[in-house]
Amino acid sequence: MTLTQSLVVAGIRATNAVGSALSRMGLTPVSLDEHDLLAAARRSTGLDDFGDDDFREPLGRLLSCLRTEAELTLLGRVAARRDLTGLLSNRLRLEEDRKRHPEIAAERIVAPIFIVGLPRTGSTLLHHLLGQDPDTRVAQAWEVMYPSPPPDRSTYEGDRRIERATQQLRWLDWLAPDFRSIHPVGAQLPLECIAIMSASFRATRFQTTYNVPTYEAWLNGQDMRPAYAFHRRFLQHLQWRAPGARWVLKAPSHVFSFDALLETYPDARIVQTHRDPVTALGSVASLSFVLHRAFSRRREPARFGHEVTARWTEGLERSLDLRRNGRIPPERLVDLHYHEFVKDPMEAVRRIYSQFGMRLTPAADTRMRAFLAQNPKDKHGRHEYALDTFGLDPEDLARRFKSYSEYFGVPSERSAR
């Protein structure tokens, strides 16, 4: 750790210590009140139209849980307030942009490709790899973080917001130094759909980052169509002046909301990534632990194992239901197994292109191979974790996910660990 990093870490600890002292005195120096956040967003933008009010209930429930359940540190409260105010500000700006340019609403989102499935199954690498095709449109981090004004193809690669996003993402290195070894981040890398959907306040991103079990339980029973309607509006906004031949999008959590996804995008194409859940869930628990630790007071690691197991038992059952009920035609589906993908990524890419009737151009092939060469496995360090740290038992996990593994022919990786 460098001297600068050591000073930053010391500053973070000192700030949180002050926050703990104030909390014991009954003081909350950083407001997470809904009225205050809405007012802050209005002040920062000079705008007041948030669009449809369907975001108000999920926002209110999320804020209540952040105040009463999340056990946020002082820095965690600062980060949450900044995050949520930014999302509200984006809502205001997106609404204003659409008023000024009503033609955005006419943009068609045609046959988007969604990468779904259990996290830690190679889906991020696949998303980044497919995004190297010049004909493919992905939602880069900078334009999701700062979508207004709508990005323009003529200035896309040199937009000033790229540097702004880079500076903001740098704070994640200080708050969660282990995160980059688990999940690559960068202003010009694709961002998941949960980030796009966050300003609807119906998004699994919040439960991944904060300890908000009551919000998560509420979200699990909700109609997700408003979140996907917002997602579609966001894509229209991004592609209006910076189009591509196709969208490639990704979020593991889409498995929880296939009905809403397919109602919003009836011609969607699905790539589902698969891996032994015994291996994958240990990595998912580790990722959640790293993020929560950055913003909250310490929680027992075993809690994370229990939570991700319950969440993904349901998620993978829903992915089985999609296949059993025949809701989507086989020609619009590709199953990709982790061990096959890492063995020959370009063969996996060729299979996806062939299945969906797309042409892999020489330029796309060259860029993809260059990306693989520049981004070897464990580029930012090896992600180390142990199942028992998170209260996970391999035999129990194998039993829980037996139906999933057998249906999709997912091989066990336990002998490799």
Image (spheres, grey):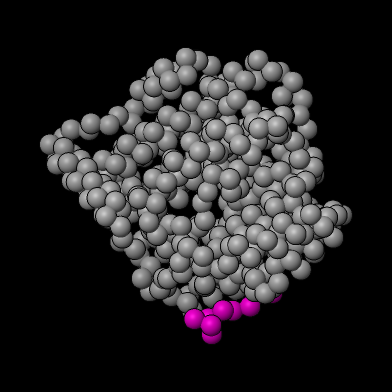
Image quadrant where residue 371 sits: bottom right
Q: Is residue 104 magenta?
A: no
Above or below: residue 140 compared with residue 43: below
Task: Pinpoint residue 297: horizontal percent, then vertical percent.
Answer: 27, 51
**Quadrant into which the N terminus falls:** bottom left
Q: Is residue 58 left or right of residue 128?
A: left
Q: Residue at x 53, y 83 (%)?
A: 416
Image quadrant where residue 388 sits: bottom left
Residue 335 seen in render: no
Main secondary structure type of the part rendered in magenta: loop
Number of disc labels: 0
Task: Pinpoint residue 82: horizontal percent, then vertical percent.
Answer: 39, 33
Above or below: residue 109 compared with residue 318: above
Above or below: residue 166 compared with residue 410: above
Q: Is residue 135 left or right of residue 195?
A: right
Frontmost residue, 305 versus 284: 284
Frontmost residue, 169 versus 44: 169
Q: Residue at x 43, y 40 (%)?
A: 168
Q: Is residue 109 left or right of residue 292?
A: right
Question: Start and end of the magenta stretch?
Answer: 409-417
Above or below: residue 129 compared with residue 231: below
Residue 51 seen in render: yes
Q: Is residue 411 magenta?
A: yes
Q: Residue at x 36, y 71 (%)?
A: 389
Q: Is residue 313 left or right of residue 232?
A: left
Task: Tell which residue pokes out farthest to the bottom in this image.
Answer: 415
Task: Pinpoint residue 362: horizontal percent, then vertical percent.
Answer: 82, 57
